[in-house]
Image (tube, grey):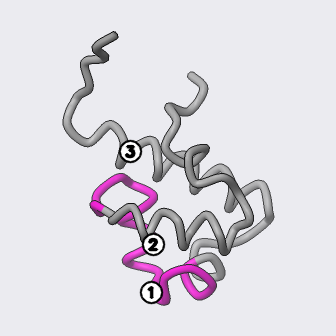
Amino acid sequence: MTVARVQGDLQRALGENLRTVRVGRGMSPPDCAEVLVGHPTYMGGVERGERNLTLRSVEKLAERLDVDPVSLLRPPPS
């Protein structure tokens, strides 16, 4: 089965899913940035799908948030 993807779909899915987890845990963007990546500007870029993270970075984010890394890459519900 072939799935056509628009360039950046996974980045946007990761950002939306990360934002959903963050908001669900009552974390502000700066709080989340401090825990996960260290800088709010970078975190905002991740959430907007502007940052192209490595798979290792996705694994680290998932580990720190205690979520399945694959769940961060799945298309978010519409």
The stretch of residues the image draws in magenta is 33-52
Q: Quadrant of residue 13?
A: top left
64 displayed left or right of 76:
right
Q: Which residue is mark 3?
A: 12
Query: Measured from the top left, where is residue 40 in percent x and y?
Result: 47, 81
Q: CA distance from mark 3 to mark 2?
A: 13 Å
Residue type at numbered disc 1: His
Q: Quadrant of residue 18?
A: bottom right
Residue 2, relative to residue 45: is it above or below?
A: above
State the residue lying farthest toward the right: 25
- In the displayed structure, does residue 27 sit left or right of residue 73? right
Q: Is residue 78 left or right of residue 9?
A: right
Which residue is rendered at x = 46% and y = 52% of the image? 15
Is 39 part of what is drawn in magenta?
yes
Q: What secondary structure is found at the residue carrying circle 2?
A: helix
Instruction: Give how far across and how far down residue 70 sits, in percent.
Output: 56, 46
| Circle 2: residue type | Met
* Residue occupying the point 79% across, 62% down: 25
Mark 2 = which residue? 43
Q: Nearer the viewer, residue 61 or 32?
A: 61
Disc 1 + disc 3, Cβ < 8 Å: no
Q: Badge 2: how crowded within 10 Å, few (<14), some, or many (20+)?
A: many
Viewer-side residue, 51 vs 1: 1
Q: Is residue 26 above or below residue 67?
A: below
Q: Earlier in the sequence, mark 3 or mark 2?
A: 3
Residue at mark 1: 39
Does the CB distance between marks 3 and 2 fall below 8 Å?
A: no
Structural crowding at the residue carrying mark 3, measured as other residues with C-alpha within 10 Å and reported as few (<14), some (14–19) or many (≥20): many
What's the amino acid at mark 3? Arg
The picture places residue 48, in percent across and down from the top left corner, at 39, 54
